[in-house]
Structure formats: C-alpha cells, structure tokens
Image: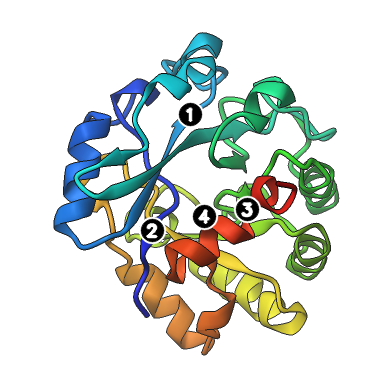
Amino acid sequence: MKIEIDTHSHTLVSGHAYNTIREMAHMAAEKGLKGLAVTEHAPKMPGSAGLYYFQNLRAVPRQMYGIRLLLGVELNIMDGEGTLDLPESVIEELDISIASIHPPCFGGERTKEVVTETYLNVMKKSCVDIIGHPDDGRFPVDYDVLAKEAKRTGTLLEVNNASLSPGGFRQDTHDNAKRMLECCKKYGTMVVAATDAHVDVSIAEYLYVQKVLEEVDFPEELVANASLEKLCSSLKRNKKA
C-alpha cells in the first residue's frame, strides 16, 4: 500500500525531536511523498512550544521541495473530560490536529471505562481530526466503542509505526492495533498510517504499520492517507468548509 502523506511528525520545536521543518520536508521529498504533516507537541508537553508558536504558523510556507505541508499540532488530552491544551479557536486555524494521551500530561484515571469515555469526549470536538496512538496498553480502551464513535464523528484513528516498533515504550501495541483495525473494518471507520517521526530518516517508514494492516487484511479504501487528496477531504475541518 502506498502512502502519499505522513500525518504525524515532529521537529526541533517539540523539544525532543532532531530536525527543522525544512529538513523534514526535504526528506519527505527524497522519499517520494506528496505531503507531510508537521504536528508539534502542544504546550503542556515538557519542552515543547508555547501558544504563540501555533498562533503564528500562518507565517510558514505550505510548500517546500514540492511537498505539501500541513502544519498542525499533537494536542495533549489532559483529563477524562477531554480537555485539550490549546484553545479550540487556535486549533481550528491550523491545517490538521491530532489528540493523544501522554503520561506526563494526562490526569485522568487509567481504567478502560474512563479512557474510553475520554476519547469519546474528545471525538465530539470538531477541531480534532485524529486520535493519536490509541494503541497504548497503559491507557486501555474499548476498541469496538472507539471505532463506532470515530465513524459517527468522522474522526480518524491512527496506526502508529513508532508504537509498533520493537523496543517501543508503549505497551501491547501490536495486539491492540489489530483489535482496533478489526473493529474499524466492522464499522467502516477510516484510519491513518503514521510514523510519529522525531527524526528525518523515520519519515515514510511504515514497516510495522504495513505488517499489521496485512495481518488483518485491512482495506486500502479505509486508509485516509493512501492519497493526499483523500486525507485532506477526510479531515473534519475541511468537511466544514
């Protein structure tokens, strides 16, 4: 399966990544992508950018080296209510948004019931396009409920290559990704294949994602970023336009 746009990447701005936007775009072009989403960690992630960075992203060109850039954010889900760490008015002005649970930021209980309800609350928000790495067993979730609600709200669910990589710090990711994908097949829920690249060489490296997609015989028509055009038309913010 060919992927035309990598939907999840970080630059130096996130505080624990290692390249500039220009370097990431250049590598995306070298690897034959048509697009790259640069999704910096939002302010509550230690070491990441502040509010003004995201408010000023309009200053950055959306084309580099023939690559279409989507400049956005990986939001931190802060609690069981689905509170996010940027104002929704700011998120709406970006090109793309991912919302993820990260241990340094999430203050809710880590039971399946609470985590599932947390994701449901987040997916109700029109400014959230993608749920990031919902495969982490440290935050258990009911994948049947998640996939059904993602379909209803038009939220994309992420299959994250960094999660699936051997030696990754998230737990039970392979089995969880398979369960999620089976539920997505059941409901016709769309997903994105993402690298979560924190260094340029990781862009467009989907080895582990491709393996798990093949294991469940996942249909290409449900992979939103198989084409740049399909990804853009699948984002909630563009459906409202």
Report which quarter residue 189 is drawn in.
bottom right
Residue 64: image x %, image y %? 24, 40
- The residue that label 2 is drawn on is 5
- The residue that label 1 is drawn on is 41
Instruction: From the viewer's perspective, tell me whether residue 215 is left or right of residue 131.
Output: left
Furthest residue toward bottom: 217
Q: Residues within 10 Å of mark 2 (few under 14, many from 20)?
A: many
- The residue that label 4 is drawn on is 171
Q: Residues within 10 Å of mark 4 (few under 14, many from 20)?
A: some
Name the residue type under label 2: Ile
- The residue that label 3 is drawn on is 235
Name the residue type under label 1: His
**Viewer-side residue, 130 vs 169:** 130
Picture layout, residue 207 above or below residue 33: below
Q: Secondary structure at mark 4?
A: loop
Name the residue type under label 3: Leu
Q: Tell me what residue is drawn at x 43 percent, y 47 percent.
A: 8
CA distance separating discs 4 and 3: 28 Å
Task: Specify whether residue 26 is in view.
Answer: yes
Picture layout, residue 82 above or below residue 140: above
Of the numbered discs in the image, which one, if any, rests on residue 147? none
Residue 22: image x %, image y %? 21, 33
Tell me which numbered mark, 3 or 1, is placed earlier along the sequence.
1
CA distance separating discs 3 and 1: 19 Å
- Tell me how many marks there are: 4
CA distance separating discs 1 and 2: 19 Å
